[in-house]
Each structure stands twice: as C-alpha cells, then as structure tokens.
Amino acid sequence: MDPVKAGVPDFNLAGKVALVTGAGRGLGAEIALALAAYGADIVVADRSLAETERTTEAVRALGRRAFPAQANLLNVAEIREMVSRAAGESGGIDILVNNAGVNLTQFAEDVTEEAWDTVLGVNLKAVFFCSQAVGRLMIGRKSGKIINVSSQTGAVAIPKRAAYCASKGGVNMLTKLLALEWAKHGVNVNAVAPTFLETPLTRPMFEDAEFRSYVLGNIPLGRIGRPADVTGAVVYLASPAADLVTGHILHVDGGWTIQ
C-alpha cells in the first residue's frame, strides 16, 4: 500500500542519507540514531574523531550504514572538503541536519570579541556554509531536506546569551531565506527550535533550584524538554510527511514563545 495514496503520513527514511553535524554526542548523536531508526544511513560529522566513531558504531548497530566525517566547522575549506568526501562515500546526501552549536554565557557588557566570533562562527556561519555546500548538491539533484537546529532564543531573549540569541535569530531568518531561494529546486529548508533540554550534560545546570524554577515557570506545559521531543520533530521534517513544509520554525518549547 502506498502510504501517500492511502492518506497515511509517511515517515520512512529508507534509502536516504543524512549528514548530521555535532553528531558525536548529546542531541546530535540522538538525532543521528533517530534518523537511523527510521531507515536513514548517517554521515556522522563532528570535530572529535573519538566521539564520531562512537556514534558511527551505534548507528551501525541499528543495521544502517554510517560514515564518520571529521571537520572543524569554523573552517569553510574543511566544511567543503567534508561534504564532498561524505557525498562521494555515501552516494549522495538527501538530508542535512545543522545541529552543531555552542554557547558561552556572559552578560552583554562582558562579551568578548573572541566569544562573539566563536558563537556566531559555529552557530550561524557554519550553518550557512554547510547548507551551501550540501545545498549545491541538492540543487543538482532537484531534491533534499535541510533542518537547522535553532532555539527558542531566536524568538525570545534570555539573559547572558547575547551572542547565542543573535546567532539563533540569524538561523531563523537564514532558514526562511534558503527555503525561499531553493524551493524551485525541490529543496525544503526548516528549523527546529527547542527549549532547554534535560540531558546528562545539562543535568548539573538544573540542580540549581532557582534556575530550574525559572525555566519551568516559563514553560506552560510544565516540564523541561527531552531529546526525544526534538528528534521526533527532526524525523518529521526529514520525512516525506513534511514534503509541503518549508521555511518553518518549529518551536519545541512547551509553549515558552507563545507568551
């Protein structure tokens, strides 16, 4: 039975290749494994070779092909080389998830030039040049899905995150611009914008009772996010079920940004 003809959403990613940046650990690794669980083969991109290999092994354990790809995303030449090599090894890239990101918390009056350049470099510049490198391939094939991992801070300001908020606001507008320009080529570009997520890496942050109360007080649904909340959104946007969705910023924030 053809799911589309039957009116049933199709989330099957079999036969697709997804490149996920920052996939060595944390949310990036979770995204890579979720896409693999729905049938995609994965290009595991990360700066750390050891962490890249760990996620690669986990993807292969699910029965999917996995291709480790190491690159410093602050270096455009390395981005282009990584994409070219990964496309050659995998047979082509159907899905790009720009997940890699960094945050350096400082009050605005204390932000250094180095911190600003690092955050904007990883969170915005690298997103553009990864999208450009993969987008050129997708344009040639007349199809593709690009999903940018943004943040609720692209829509609402949160203290001590001047550079981060600026970078994610930029990601949101870049998402819309690329969606507009590349729609005629059959390329969908969307973003997922999560709230704070509770993971082994962030758990110490939520041990601060005052901070935890601040976060929960701003989430109408009353709970902190989990990785599965975000990976589900990514799988949806990567799948045929979202073929008519482009230029959208999908907030996975429990309602924070509707207030």
Image (cartoon, rainbow, N blue to C red):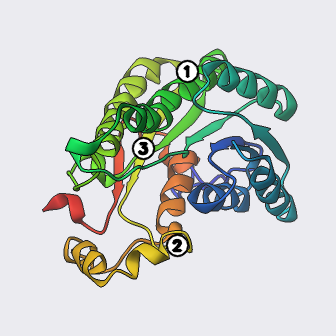
C-alpha separation, residue under disc 3 versus residue under disc 1: 16 Å
Label 1 Cα neighbours within 10 Å, binned few <14 / some 14-19 / many ≥20: some
Relative depth, front residue between 240 and 178 = 178
Relative depth, front residue between 140 and 28 = 28
Q: Earlier in the sequence, mark 2 or mark 1?
A: 1
State the residue at coordinates (71%, 27%).
Answer: 83
* Residue topped by disc 3: 191
Q: Position of residue 69 (x, y in %)?
A: 77, 38
Q: Amino acid at mark 1?
A: Gln
Relative depth, front residue between 238 and 167 = 167
Q: Up-down: is 220 above or below 235?
A: below
Secondary structure state at the residue bearing disc 3: strand
Question: In screen coordinates, is 70 left or right of 229?
Answer: right
Relative depth, front residue between 26 and 208 = 208
* Residue topped by disc 2: 199
* Residue topped by disc 1: 132
Q: Amino acid at mark 3?
A: Ala
Within the image, what quadrant is residue 231 found in? bottom right
